[in-house]
Image: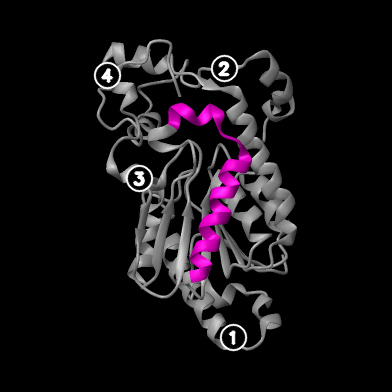
Amino acid sequence: MSASSAPDTMLNAYQTPDHAPFEWRNGPHAVLLIHGFPGTPAEMRTVGEVFASEGWSVRGLLLPGFGAEFAEIGGKRQADWQTAVDAAVAELRRKHPVVLLAGNSFGGALALATAAMQPVDGVILFAPFWRLDSWLDRVYPLAERVLPRIRPFARADFDDPGFRTELTHFLSEVDLDDPVVRAQIRRLELPTRVIGQVRRAGQIGYAAAGQVSAPTLIFQGRSDPLVRPHVTQRLAQRLPNLAGYIEVEGEHDLVRGQTAGWPVIDKTLRTFAEQVTNKEKKFAQSADQMTEPFQPSDFANDGQQFPCKIYGADH
C-alpha cells in the first residue's frame, strides 16, 4: 500500500522479523505454509508450530510483493505468486518424501493450483478464497477500469476491536488512537489491479480443484464474513478426494490459534498429518492406492464429539 504522503510509521509496516519467511528443519516430512492477502508468514506460524511439534519440517513462504515489499505489490501478478509456490514445492519434493501444502484464504487458491499440477501428499485449506460472495464480484471488471486505486480503510472504524487487531498484525508499533495516525491510515491506497490478480488466483484455484488428487482437508469459520460457508461448500464439492470439510466457531482468521474453534483445528491437523504419513508407509509400493479417499474416521474425532461439521469424500 501507499499513501499520498506516507509517514515513517506507515513505511515500517511488515518490518518486524515475524513477517519474514522461515524454515524449521525437524524431520523427513515437510509442510509448506502459504499466507493470505495481504498477509505474511507471521499468520501461519501457529499452524507451523503444530507440525513442528509433531516432528515435521516447516517452511513459511513469503509471496513476492508481500511483507516488507508491499509497496511493490502493484507490479505483481497471479503468475508471480503461483511460480513462487510451484518452485517451493518442487524444492521440498527433492528433499522430503512427504510434502503437504497448507494455504490460508487466497493462499489456499494458490495451493490448489499447485496441487493440481505437482504431486503432493495432502492439502489443507483454511477459509479458502475463490470468489467474493457479493455484487462487487460482478462489477469488478468495470470498477478496475474506473477506479485505478482504492482506499480500503477510508471509512474504517478504529473503535472496532476486530479491526484494531487486524491492523496490529502489520502495524504493530503505531498508536491507533492518534488522530494523525488514523488520518494517515485512511489515506492508504491500493492499486485496484491487485484485487483483480487476487480474484484471478481464486478463479484458477477453483478451476484446478477438480484435478487435485491428494486428500484435501478444509477448515471453515461458521461466521466468516469474507469467505462464507456455502461458498466454500461449493469448492469442497469439486474436490475428488475430499478428506474433510470442517466448520468451526470462528470468522475468517482461523490460523493464529485465537479463534474459539482452534482446539478442533489443532487436533485435526495433528491426526491428519499422522494419517498422511501412515498412508504413505502403507501404500509406498502401490502408487494407485495412494489416492484412495480418506474417510472422516481416519482423522477426525477418535470417538469424541467436536463442535464442527465433518464431511467425508462421499458428500
Amino acid on which the number 4 mark rests in the picture: Asp
Q: Which mark identifies residue 284?
A: 1
What span is colored magenta in the figure? 70-94
How far separated are the C-alphas under marks 2 and 1? 51 Å
Nearer-the-camera pick, 90 or 17: 90
Q: Where is residue 49 shown, x and y percent of the image?
A: 34, 61
Q: Which residue is mark 3?
A: 20
Mark 2 is surrounded, within 10 Å at the Cα level, by few (under 14), some (14 to 19) or many (20 or more) other residues, namely some
Q: SS of the residue at dot 1?
A: loop
Q: Where is residue 264 shown, x and y percent of the image?
A: 44, 62
Q: Are marks 2 and 1 in contact (CB under 8 Å)?
A: no
User: Residue shown at 46%/20% (left/top)?
Assistant: 153
How far separated are the C-alphas under marks 2 and 3? 27 Å
How far separated are the C-alphas under marks 4 and 3? 27 Å
How far separated are the C-alphas under marks 1 and 3? 35 Å
- Snapshot quadrant of residue 270: bottom left
